[in-house]
Amino acid sequence: MSLKSFLKSQRLKLKHWYHRSLLNHHDFSIISNNCWGTRTYQKYGLEYLSPFQSALIFAPDYINLITNFSIEKLEILSFIKPHNSKYIDELKRQDLYDKTYPIALLKDATEVHFIHYKTPEDAYDKWTRRVKRINLKKLIFKFSDGDLATDLLIQKFDQLPYPNKVCFTSKPYSHLKNVVFMKRFKNQDRVTLEWKYDYKYINLHKFINRMTTKSLTPSI
């Protein structure tokens, strides 16, 4: 390893140590509709205690999946091709249709788009191993207003009986308790790369430190 690489790795370790020092909890599981959870774990240098890494779940499927959330719903049944996706039109609109990434089907027909994976085998292996790591007593649910999200779905998310949740949006929802309006995107129809700008709108370590540490429902 070169001196430059060594110094870079040490700076990263120091940065992780500092961010972790702000946390009271290091064993939380993030259930996210996109890569926000991945980036959050990376910020603190923490192990992925959730399978929702480097993956995309379209908003209708995501809300359906986390309503009455349970481990059993996370079982992968099969993998499909893009032309079999119920979101084929959206895949084409987002230029995802011709990408060669795995798409998994869960037990409730939720599609998990592993946009940063190359093979179904790799996606299945990592998803299955990380499902087993989920800490059911420390769950954080995250949502955002892209990928076919609607006002109704955002409202449904806000009403879910989970105490540790946050939704990032490009317009204000002052009547909703768990929505964080990101003014940076006020002239756009959705937020993007919210993990890059969330620090401007939410004190993440305080949000994590305030989390309720109790299983949410008997079914979980």
Image: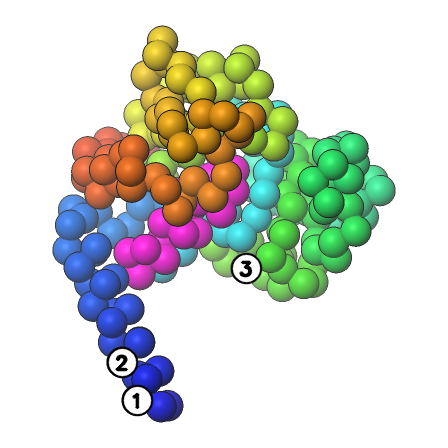
Q: Is residue 126 above or below residue 210?
A: below
Q: CA distance from mark 3 to mark 1?
A: 33 Å
Q: Is residue 190 left or right of residue 14?
A: right
> Would you name the residue on which mark 1 appears?
3
> Would you name the residue on which mark 2 appears?
7
Mark 3 and mark 1 lie on one chain; the one further toward the N terminus is: 1
Q: Residue at x 53, y 15 (%)?
A: 151
Quarter of the image that includes the C terminus: top left
The answer to whether any part of residue 170 appears in the image is no
Q: CA distance from mark 2 to mark 1?
A: 6 Å
> Would you name the residue on which mark 3 appears?
126
Viewer-nearest of discs 3 and 1: 1
| Snapshot quadrant of residue 108 | top right
Quarter of the image that includes the N terminus: bottom left
Please state which of residues 156 and 172 is positioned toward the viewer in this rendering. 172
Q: Secondary structure at mark 1?
A: helix
Q: Is residue 119 above or below residue 172?
A: below
Q: Residue at x 40, y 17 (%)?
A: 172
**Circle count:** 3
Residue 59, image x, y percentages: 58, 29
Q: Secondary structure at mark 2?
A: helix
> Magenta residues?
30-45
How packed mark 3 is, by other alpha carbons closer than 10 Å (few <14, some 14-19, many 20 or more), is: some
Residue 215, image x, y percentages: 32, 32
Circles 2 and 1 in contact, beta carbons < 8 Å = yes
Q: Residue at x 35, y 82 (%)?
A: 5
Q: Secondary structure at mark 3?
A: helix
Mark 3 and mark 2 lie on one chain; the one further toward the N terminus is: 2
| Snapshot quadrant of residue 135 | top left
| Snapshot quadrant of residue 86 | top right
